[in-house]
């Protein structure tokens, strides 16, 4: 059996080093990075699930609290995967050690993969915590484990890439919160987390179909409950297509040194 080449070993060490750094960074301050998601989602379940849910009744044959649970889990994954990478990458720019990575004898794709994996780990960890919280309020059982795992992994990758792009263009720490506040939050709240788009008028239903978050929430809801407003194949096509676009764009920006060498 042929031994791995020295170049492969060097790349693997570089990738693992970045991932360990990223995971250690957010794990060390878990009271700020992991716990708040569990607390805030508990409030969502109490307010929307127990107080408002009984007045709404059922959606697609499920109690309201059970229907919104997959969307709340996905919302926490999206926000945390994005937040981890944008803050970490901008911090690396601010402290100027990202330049050392870029001049090292490793391709930009390895650097990109390391940051994205760190964001993915935090997103999955927070998603696990929120799922545990959800089980305190309602019953959840996977309709398709393959769809659940694929959706949550691909979504965390997608928004980790989005966070890295935000970090590349950010010029100050304030810039790292603009996209989450004015773009991510509206897309998430209007992405079918709290309702089915079948309840919307035709015009607004068409508008909702232009929201990529809808496809992620719906695919994950299908994996948990077995119901969806959009075809699952289309949902995965949208998610994978967005990942391909953002990966190529991120790699281009890193190779050009945009926001770093200028």
Image: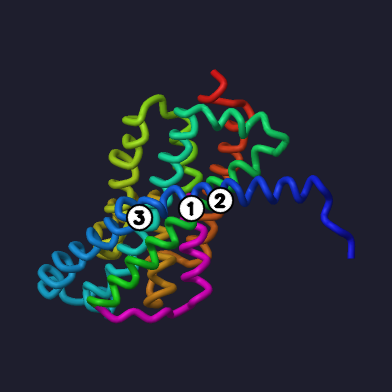
For disc 1, the marked residue is 23
Query: Could you say whether the residue bearing mark 1 is in a helix, strand or loop?
Result: helix
- Image: 72 above or below 54: above
Q: Position of residue 46 (x, y in %)?
A: 16, 68
Q: Which mark is residue 30?
A: 3
155 magenta-colored: yes
Query: Could you say whether the residue bearing mark 2 is in a helix, strand or loop?
Result: helix
Q: Position of residue 41 (x, y in %)?
A: 25, 62
- Image: 81 above or below 224: above
Give the position of the C terminus as an image quadrant.
top right
What residue is at 46 percent from the left and 66 percent from the top?
Answer: 231
Q: Which mark is residue 93?
A: none
Magenta stretch bounds: 138-158
Name the one closer to the observer, 217 or 93.
Answer: 93
What residue is at 39 percent from the left and 67 percent from the top?
Answer: 128
For disc 2, the marked residue is 19
**Cβ–Cβ below 8 Å for labels 2 and 3?**
no
What residue is at 76 percent from the left and 50 percent from the top?
Answer: 9
- Image: 51 above or below 238: below
Q: CA distance from mark 3 to mark 1?
A: 10 Å
């Amino acid at each position: 059996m042929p031994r791995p080449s020295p170049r492969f070993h060097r790349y693997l060490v570089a990738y693992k080093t970045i991932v360990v750094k990223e995971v250690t960074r957010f794990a060390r301050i878990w009271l700020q990075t992991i716990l708040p998601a569990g607390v805030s989602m508990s409030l969502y379940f109490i307010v929307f699930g127990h107080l408002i849910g009984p007045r709404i009744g059922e959606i697609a044959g499920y109690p309201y609290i059970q229907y919104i649970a997959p969307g709340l889990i996905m919302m926490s994954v999206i926000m945390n995967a994005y937040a981890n990478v944008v803050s970490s990458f901008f911090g690396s720019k601010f402290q100027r050690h990202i330049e050392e990575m870029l001049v090292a004898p490793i391709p930009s794709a390895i650097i990109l993969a390391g940051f994205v994996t760190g964001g993915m780990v935090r997103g999955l960890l927070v998603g696990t915590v929120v799922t545990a919280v959800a089980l305190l309020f309602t019953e959840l059982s996977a309709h398709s484990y393959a769809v659940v795992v694929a959706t949550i992994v691909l979504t965390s990758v997608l928004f980790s890439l989005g966070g890295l792009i935000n970090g590349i263009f950010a010029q100050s720490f304030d810039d790292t919160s603009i996209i989450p506040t004015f773009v991510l939050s509206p897309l998430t709240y209007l992405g079918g987390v709290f309702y089915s788009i079948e309840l919307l008028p035709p015009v607004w239903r068409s508008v909702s179909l232009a929201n990529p978050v809808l496809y992620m929430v719906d695919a994950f809801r299908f994996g948990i409950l077995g119901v969806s407003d959009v075809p699952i194949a289309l949902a995965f096509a949208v998610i994978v297509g967005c990942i391909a676009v953002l990966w190529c764009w991120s790699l281009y920006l890193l190779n050009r040194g945009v926001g770093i060498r200028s």
